[in-house]
Image (tube, rainbow, N blue to C red):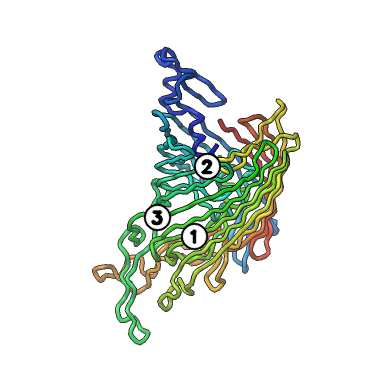
Amino acid sequence: MSKMTKNKLAILALAGLGAAVSGPAFAAGMTVDTKGGIEVFELDESNYWFKLGGRLFFDQVFFDDDNGDDVFIVNNVNVGAFPSGAHIRAARLTLKGGVGYNWVYKFEFDVKDRPGQTRIRFGEAFLGYSGCKNFWFALGQVSLPFGLENWQSSNDTVFMEVSMPTSAFAPDKGLGLYAEWHGNMMTAAAALYHPQVAGSLQTGDVLSQPVFLNNNPAFPPIAGTGPFDSDPGSDDVGFTARLTFAPIHDDYTVYHFGVAARYESLHDNANDFDYVANLEAFARQSPNLFTNIPPNSSKDHHVWGFELAGRWGPLLVQGEYMIADVDRDETFPPFDLRNPGGDLDYYGYYVQASYVLTGETRSYDFDSGTFGGVHPHSRKGAWELGVRHSFIDLVDNTALPTNRRFYFVDFVPSNAVDSEGNPAPTAGNNILTGVDGNDLAGSAHSTTVGLTWWVNDNVRFLTNYIHVSLPSDQDVDILGFRGQVAW
């Protein structure tokens, strides 16, 4: 059953909660059930149903690096720190429901725990239709199909976090139209969307280029007038698709093959686009890995993903390879910080294996082409052991500046003026030189060993040990713990 069509299995909505406890609801033949959440439905009618669900992940992560003082040094400059800490990794409330024959809806509230702030935003929020044989459609803010690891529910992952390549190259949510189809051995899913999550803003700066005579600027450039001197314009457009092929997928054996593609337009040379990878266990202040793509230098980008997996009873082996290309101008004006120009290419991969020590088999959902969780056969739960190695290359052109983040995403020269000819307010003061102490530009290898105790279908505890080799030959050891409940 697909990630989208699972919305037909459970019944949700705050309205459903009220219906569950009201006399008229029971008088109308409503039934209440629970497996941790609240489910309200009619035994003889599937048109109208409601369910309330959610998840809560709590992480504690400890770091130990080569320097012994939790400081990451490159060229005698402090460019990162690895403070240990705890955080609410995920907190979600989910509402689902059926509102007539073949019509369903879903919306989620996600709580994001960040240093000094807690933000609430929408997750999936859509209206779906399943009235066409073997098809499913959804309209709204949808998850975007790309990759085996990315498309799997985070409730069921082998490790605490997805691999670095998936973190960097796979999309999250988009505003648009989603469609999927299922055959006997093949599935297809695609989405046409605006890349931004609801409520987010696109930043960037649009400038008129200076006019040069004899290599000297005859007319100064004109700075933009939007937020951060930007002029974002209309929303960008993206397209992503995923095909899977599983010639064998029975209760014991699965052979899985997949390919995915992602394309997103960007405001030409007016964006702060970047690929950013999380470490494979992290606390609130942990650094990320990012590319050295200069802001305001990208035009569009596309990513390809290839996936392969096999399951034989309690043993699961899988891997993915991803390549990304960023389209940029071949040249930029003299003294422009975006030089040198030219397209940029990046790639990454991971391979992993897991084995359920107590003999259970991870379920395979053919419709979505993903592997589900472990359902313990005993009241003592189930135990799973996993190992993964991943690599990501986030530096293409070493002539571009590295190990820095721009706090402002424009490139206003010191002689820039506004549209009325006055000096631009941020001229010559738009870039903070140096580095952001929490982010690192570069490539990395990461090896993870994990042990999971599946207490029951709703609760599990994870322990992960990760060894990461970062730029400048720095190694970091990470020990992560997670307590998780999902209903």
Local secondary structure at mark 1: strand
Quadrant for the C terminus, please: top right
Q: Where in the figure is residue 484, as x and y percent of width and height?
A: 61, 35
Q: Where in the figure is residue 348, as x and y percent of width and height?
A: 61, 59
Residue pointed to by mark 3: 237
Q: Is residue 64 visible?
A: no
Q: Which mark is residue 302?
A: 1
10 Å crowding of disc 3: few (<14), some (14-19), many (20+): some
Looking at the image, which is closer to me, 214 or 258?
258
Kindly identify the amino acid type of the residue bearing the numbered disc 2.
His
Q: CA distance from mark 1 to mark 3?
A: 12 Å
Q: CA distance from mark 2 to mark 1?
A: 25 Å
Q: Upstream in the sequence, badge 3 or badge 2?
A: 2
Local secondary structure at mark 2: strand
Kindly identify the amino acid type of the residue bearing the numbered disc 1.
His
**Closer to the eye: label 2 or 1:** 2
